Image (cartoon, rainbow, N blue to C red):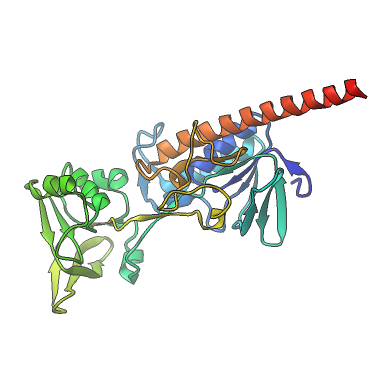
Amino acid sequence: MKENSVRNLIIIGSGPAGLTAAIYASRALLEPLVVAGRTPGGQLMITSEVENFPGFPESILGPELMVKMREQATRFGTDFIDDDVTSVDFSRRPFAVTVGEQTYRSRSVIIATGASALWLGIESEKKFMGKGVSGCATCDGAFFRNVPVAVIGGGDSALEEALFLTRYASHVTIVHRRDRLRASPYMQRRAETNEKISFVWNSVVKEITGDKKVDGVILEDVRTGEERRLNVGGVFIAIGHRPNTDIFKGQIPLDEKGYIIVHDGSRTGVEGVFASGDVHDHRYRQAITAAGMGCISALDAQRFLEETESHASAEREEETQKA
């Protein structure tokens, strides 16, 4: 690994977006460095089966898919560091990306750090992750055909999840800690008029129960403290996502929720810095869309580097002629 030289491209993040960017960039002979994080692979590392990624008719385990993508990037010459970026400096080129005590410099950077689902934070939630607990109805809804499920949350995301799940589940119960929803009136009306959706108000999940997989939840009334059991085969947590952009604050423009603002494909507010995947996409949040965005960001970075080098060569030629 060329630690002290200036790289062509550093990719921060190793989910579908980051690894797809690495595959395209390495095939373009950019010799990218991927700072993969201490827990590489993104959210697919906690996904049991992936049925909607093209090319795997019998489905594939999330971690297995990420291993294959990493092996493919490595085959074409991508370097990896399995550690977290601690700081960046995009104020001048070459850009600086610091990992612990080591600083790497690069002519371009792709940010693919993704977004993290917000979780309830209870122990049983971790126990049943991928065994009935999910943060993505689009990803996992088909596994719950004719099974009653619960959706935890009260915003637009929760109602979108619930409405999507009515395609598969026998019934969907929305559990909300307040006595009214935070979602838009339009989404509320859609949910309230759907015969497969019901509501439990003023309640929080105290425990998720089951043996090898989820068989119910224990709910606690926030007003009275009274507990009740809800028999469900799946629990979908929909209390929001948080983009992993803390280290980029003050370096590139972010929106009010912390997502990276992009324009003209994957370009950010800093020339030479690109973004792909859930770190700027708060609408689709799918492995395949993240991978597609990874491809776009790699092509944009390649084009930027070519244009930059062409401009630099022209300046050098002009200086030579003057001399």
Asked whether, in this view, residue 260 is left or right of residue 221, the answer is right
Most extreme residue toward the bottom is 225
Please provide percent x and percent y for residue 38: 56, 58
Most extreme residue toward the top is 321
Report which quarter residue 79 is drawn in.
top right
Q: Nearer the viewer, residue 236 or 72?
A: 236
Asked whether, in this view, residue 1 is left or right of residue 161, the answer is right
Q: Is residue 113 visible?
A: yes
Image height of 210 relative to 106, above or below: below
Looking at the image, which residue is at 14% across and 69% down? 229
Looking at the image, which residue is at 16% across and 48% down? 185
Image height of 31 relative to 248, above or below: above
Please provide percent x and percent y for residue 206: 24, 72
Report which quarter residue 309 is drawn in.
top right
Count of number-bearing discs: 0
Looking at the image, which residue is at 33% across and 70% down? 122
Question: Which image quarter is the C terminus in?
Answer: top right
Image height of 6 relative to 296, above or below: below
Q: Is residue 145 visible?
A: no
Please provide percent x and percent y for residue 35: 61, 50
